Image: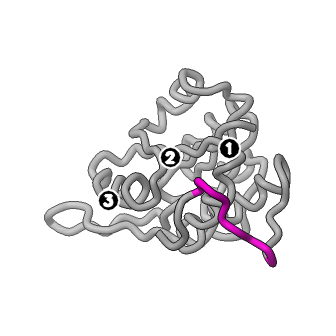
Amino acid sequence: MKNFVIDVDGVMTDGQFHVSSEGKVMKIFGPDDHDALLLLKPFINIIFVTGDKKGFPITRKRIEEEMKFPLEIVSTFERVAWIKNHFNPKETIYMGDGIFDAMVFKAVGYSIAPQNAFSKIKEHADFVTPSKGGESAVAEACFHIAEKFFEPFDVLNLELKSGQGEWGK
């Protein structure tokens, strides 16, 4: 596997939108996900996608500015085509939670859903994390990917390697 494409809302977040009369004001991102992504980064290309145009400034702040990962706006309906245009789908892992993500799961080499994914979607995932999106599901996916495709992380001797980024950002 060479690519890990991660949907943001419902996977990195709890999937809920906090909306005021001015619009979306907040998203809840979970703990541990960024640290685990930094551990996985030397092994695989990591990119995030979102279809949430109205909440994009919030997502950009967290994913691009703070975590330093690439982020693309890609409609759920366009994700299969987008993946095919940017990557070899059979070398791509996709993590999603929504109703239409089964189409993406079918097109990629490996699929992951968080525990709180839509029930019918989980039936089509290769792996379902024990935790929900926004509650370390991505961290669990990272550990699973490392063990299945690369080398397992030793939780007693974890260290950040040069070029991986910074802890706690």
Left or right of residue 65, residue 169 in this image: right
Residue 157 drawn in magenta:
yes
In the rendered structure, which amino acid carries the disc numbered 2? Answer: Phe
Magenta region, residue range: 156-164
Which residue carries the number 2 mark? Answer: 48
**Residue 1: % across, % down:** 75, 38
Q: Residue at x 46, y 44 (%)?
A: 70
Tell me the residue that label 3 is attached to.
Answer: 58
What is the secondary structure assignment of the residue under circle 3? helix
Q: How far apart are marks 3 and 1 (CA)?
A: 25 Å
**Mark 2, secondary structure of its residue:** strand
User: Residue 163 lies in magenta, yes or no?
Assistant: yes
Q: Is residue 142 above or below residue 131?
A: above
Q: Which colour scheme is used?
A: one colour
> Across the whole image, how many numbered discs are drawn on residues?
3
Residue 52 position, x and y percent, is 36, 48
Q: Which amino acid does label 1 sit on?
A: Ile
- Counting residues from the start of the chain, the first of labels 3 and 1 encountered is 1
Query: Which one is in front in this view, the residue at disc 3 or the one at disc 1?
Result: 1
Q: Residue at x 52, y 49 (%)?
A: 7
Query: Depth check: 67 or 20 in front?
Result: 67
Mark 2 or mark 3, which has the lower sequence index? 2
Q: Can residue 122 be seen in this view?
A: yes
In the image: residue 157, left or right of residue 13:
right
- Residue kind at label 3, given as amino acid type: Ile
Residue at image position (58%, 45%) is 46
x and y percent of residue 113 in the render?
66, 54
Which residue bears the numbered disc 1? 44
Q: What element carries label 1?
A: loop
Q: Do the residues labelled 3 and 1 touch (CB within 8 Å)?
A: no
Q: Main secondary structure of the magenta part?
A: loop
